[in-house]
Image (spheres, rainbow, N blue to C red):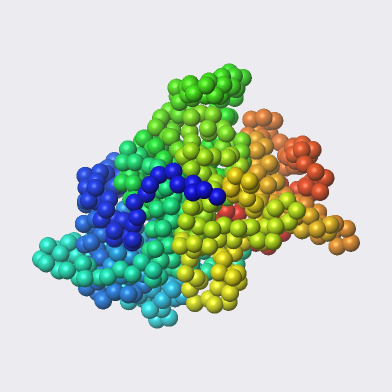
Amino acid sequence: MKSRIVYEAEKIRDFRELLGRTASKYPDQIAYKYKIRVGKEEPEYVNKTYSEFKKDVEGLATSLLTMGLEGKKVALIGNNRYEWCTTYLAVTTAGMIVVPLDKALPDNEIESLIIRSGADAIVCEEKYLRAILKTKKEGKSNLNYIICMEKTNEQEVLSYKAMLEQGKKLRTNGNQKYEEIQINPEEMSIILYTSGTTSISKGVMLSQKNICSNIQAIASYVHMSTDDTLLSFLPIHHTFECTITFLYGIYFGVTVAFCDGLKYIQKNMNEYHITVFVSVPLVLENIHKKVWKSIEEKGKKPLMKTMVGITKGLSKVKVDLRRKAFKPILDQFGGKLRVVFVGAAPLDKKIIQGFNDFGVQLVQGYGLTETSPVVSCETDKEKRPGSIGLPLYNLEVKIDNPDEDGIGEILVKGPSVMLGYYQNEEANKKAFKDGWFCTGDYGYLDKKGFLYISGRKNDVIVLKNGKNIYPQELEILLNQVPEIEESMVYARDKSSMDTTLCAKIVYDKENIQNLYGEKTQEEIKEIIWKKVKEVNQTLPDVKHIKEIVVTQEPLAKTTTQKVKRYEEMKKG
């Protein structure tokens, strides 16, 4: 198959070269925009240029090196913020190993991962200090230094701000410790713990070569520029947000603005005039539902559908009026949004088409923590809604043991595949097959080379006739129903008879009230059951959902909004 390279991308060896290249090319370009709040006063807006960012990274790195942390592990936990980004690169560009931790972890898991990773230091927000100080006091870990991003009165805790200023002063006075460090891009530089949706989290060992090769390949498919502004809202410890928004953003010299929280996404998109949005399906599904709900409430649904048809027809003769025709909708999100990167789970084709109809390009991709993360994505020139794009040009992808429909496990080989799981040889043996990484995802490749995902290997429901049912496919259909907020399809074995497909459904209370008025729980279940039967009519008999559980309680999820199926199944 011929190369799918769309753009010639500059090679980058390691993170120091990544930052140095961009700071040299765009020293005065705004790298980060964020707010500082003091008490009840109005927030102060701060802009940091790439030149300032590089100096802060070098200053903090110098301070860490003077503490004897070269070659040591430094854990990092906190919200998406400037100090997090500075710390990540200070650690990795100074020959240390960074251990990003999930900000949503409970205290006992924070303690467990500090111990398991062997971290010698941790940089954190103040709200984590109690758990971290307890861990240090108990003496079960290697923890020697605790560095807080905010002011604190704790005697045993170092100040991030003081360390940053100290490091800058040392460099001004001629300290060259940072420059003396030699980076080996093939060595472990990051330990990233998986979200653990079905089992105990595993520490994924990544090198700077892993991630830099991934960035370079993505840059050959999809282009950004210094005119772009990204909104960082997905958990930054997670490889999808960390690579695509943070590190890939640096590669192109874009501006990153930090989100104030999930409920402020739309406000922040307006505030910062966001052009590129990195998201997950659940968020996009909710945005799409709200847009069309607003259109219906105004009685403009027929007009809007007519306009969509007209603009589609015009686009076929190279006349694109979408952004003008749907300007009122785009203005709800700042008016500048041009592209959305979406990953982490399959997205319904109707949602993809819905955004495209309004003039916003959706770039669907697929990846895993273990692959740094991107395996495949659509390009600026080649798209196929419903697929997860084309495998990156520097990766090999194959389908293992395909069935009659060509569906089998997706295997990957190439420079962005992890070094292995940290101190877990048993998991490493299961993860690789003849040199290929086993993703645990089922999918297939079409004749044009586009990759499609069917579902997780562990989630597949095997009927007694040997047929495979992929829950995610059914969930996508259920989640289209306006009365349904989210769903999880699972199996219940009837022993002597065939497996029964069931669905746990979280209903949209507000929408049901608007459509039907006040209803009892039993009446709501009847409404939902009727809608499920309508979905069943579009499916073969073997895929029919036979039982439902209806609830208002949101499904348990990871910080990237993946349903924790194992946890939900335990609830019964």
User: Where residue 95 sits in the image (x, y, percent)?
Assistant: 31, 70
Q: Residue at x 47, y 56 (%)?
A: 394
User: Where residue 328 sits in the image (x, y, percent)?
Assistant: 46, 24
Q: Residue at x 57, y 57 (%)?
A: 397
Q: Residue at x 31, y 46 (%)?
A: 253
Q: Quadrant of residue 149?
A: bottom left
Q: Is 84 drawn above or below residue 132 in the view shown? A: above
Q: Quadrant of residue 162?
A: bottom left
Q: Is residue 568 left or right of residue 188?
A: right
User: Where residue 473 sits in the image (x, y, percent)?
Assistant: 68, 47
Q: Is residue 77 left or right of residue 109?
A: left
Residue 129 in view, yes or no: no
Q: Residue at x 70, y 46 (%)?
A: 474
User: Where residue 108 sits in the image (x, y, percent)?
Assistant: 49, 70
Query: Outermost residue toward the left?
Result: 173
Residue 288 in view, yes or no: yes
Q: Is residue 571 left or right of residue 48?
A: right
Q: Is 154 drawn above or below residue 354 in the view shown? A: below
How many numbered marks are there? Answer: 0
Residue nearer the viewer, 454 or 275: 454
Query: Outermost residue toward the right?
Result: 496
Residue nearer the viewer, 350 or 2: 2
